[in-house]
Image (spheres, helix red, strand yellow):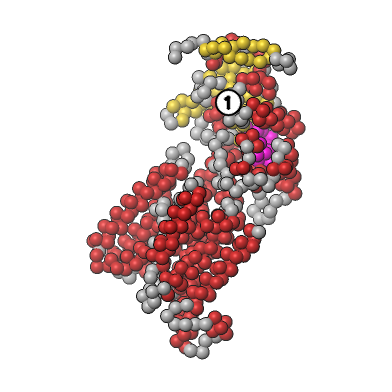
Amino acid sequence: MNLSAENISVRLGGKEILRNVNCNFLSGKKTAIIGPNGAGKSTLLKILCLLIKNFSGNVKIDGIDIRTLGRNNLARIMAILPQERDAPHDTTVKQLISFGRFPYRKFFGGNSSEDDAAIKNALEITKLTDFANRQVISLSGGEKQRAWLAMTLAQRPKILLLDEPTTYLDISHQLEVMDIISDVNKKFSTTIIMVLHDINHARLFSDQILIIKDKKVFAAGNPKKILSAQTLSDIFNVEADIFKNSAGDEIIFPIRRTNSEF
Amino acid sequence: MKTIKLSLIFAATVAGFFLSLINGSVEISSAQIFFGIEDETKRQILENIRLPRTIVAILVGVNLSLSGAILQAVMKNPLADPHIIGISSGAGLFGIFVMMVVDDAGAFMTPAAFVGAMLAAALIYLLAWKDGIRPIRVILAGVAVSAFLGAGISALLIFYSDKVHGALLWMVGGLSARSWQHVEILLPYSIAGTIATFLAARHLNVLQLGDEVATGLGLRVNLVRTILTTIAALLAASAVCVVGLLGFVGLIVPHTARLILGSDYRLLLPGAALLGAAVVTISDTFARTIFAPTELPVGILMAMLGAPFFLYLLRKEL
């Protein structure tokens, strides 16, 4: 499904965070939101899923204002993996994933066969089937992230929002998580919107990039076109080299800051 | 496995029920309970003293345990219980105020204590609110509100020193002379509160995942939190206005149930309710027989058991 934001402005705690942001997230595509710290990326993501409600402007799914959908209906269409989260210490991987079926609960009765299928599917796609009965707390960082990702997948979302899904993971687990996200996108045509810090991940794993800087959209479009050495210098004040790696992908590597006042 | 544990807790509740009926200043054997008593006095004691008192103990145990179990999830704080976060002292201040100022206060105490509990809960909620509920702010706001309400209670005790004894007994929390009229006060709150709480088990589970995750899963966090806080206040207020400020049940019992049964509220809630009933009936049986003929208010015994257990939990879990 197509997600669009029109004229989004928001103030939090008296401070202006975003001003007149317009963006369109294409159906079935992966979009990475990048930008410097404090630019308003996470705020934008939270607005897109109504975690923040007191903003001006509209967020629309296929032209329908998401504020008219109702929380539960929205949760059947859109899933979010926030950074802030918690699970009781004895929660197993399977229990955690089954919370993803909460939007589909009935007033009485247990899991339907559809629930069971969705949970099984989420376990498979995140390669956690063997970990189903392990406690989440006993997992490594990468496995934990996959378990939480699996919970959002059990929601069977058409749109998946991810807030820095690779933070705190080592390079191998970062790639693992990015691969799973690409997999989900390919298999279910899920629209993916993710805030990323790693420019190279944004370049390699997304179809579209949205750059937020100083409360506004700085640039949007094809990652290979807009992520030049010049843009990098403009957004991050960093001088960078771009070169081809052995796989033939263009890689960005920072050299030095361009304004070294400190 | 967990079903067996739940059955054992149920067995303890049944045992507590019969222990409470059998023991006391007059001996009644279990055979007499099942096959009838010929002695008229003994029958009166069983039917009009022991039985209602035991039922009050069960209902109070259920209400306070469920209230604590709800608040721990709603406030995202393992330390939350009706006593510590001020719901009990809110009920206490209003209850004691009515007791002191109004003659023949019996009929007004329940609604007054309920209003007090709700106001205390609302006050703490307002003080702790800033872009959502933060556990540390709940505890700090709870401490502040409890101190504030405690000062009010102290002031009342000084102004109406002739009625201090009754108020003191009520503040410690006790079950002596609780009768059928108290069962009637408690029962509707217990039934409605228990049903509502059990229906919210899955919501409570989701709340434990954090506000953002819960919202993402379609839960209307603030609405659910407000409703559940109201239910917790209602359960605690009904218990407090009947037996006084019985401490620690709402804290110890949910935690113990959690240690035994895990954090899934679908199992934890019935476990906590049964365990609460067992703990209060058994404690009360001890409290009234241990120094017979002097009767110890059950609140004193519970606090003596509760404080060390609470410290044990702190060392084990935090």
Q: Is residue A133 left or right of residue B51?
A: right
Residue at image mark 1: A6
Residue at image point 56% right, 42% down:
A86
What percent of the width, then of the height, locates residue A10?
49, 28
Residue B48 in the image: above or below residue B62: below
Residue at image point 52% right, 34% down:
A52
What percent of the width, then of the height, locates residue A131?
69, 43
Q: Is residue B288 left or right of residue A148?
A: left
Magenta span of residues: A145-161
Secondary structure category for the residue under label 1: strand
Report the chain holding disc 1.
A
Residue A148 part of the magenta segment: yes
Q: Is residue A89 left or right of residue A123?
A: left
Residue at image point 38% right, 70% down:
B296
Where the C terminus of chain A falls, by quadrant? top left
Residue A34 in the image: above or below residue A243: below
Residue B165 in the image: above or below residue B146: below
Give A61 or B277, whichever is nearer the viewer.
B277
Please indicate, yes or no, whether residue A131 appears anywhere in the rendered image. yes
Where the N terminus of chain A falls, by quadrant? top right
What percent of the width, then of the height, locates residue A255?
57, 12
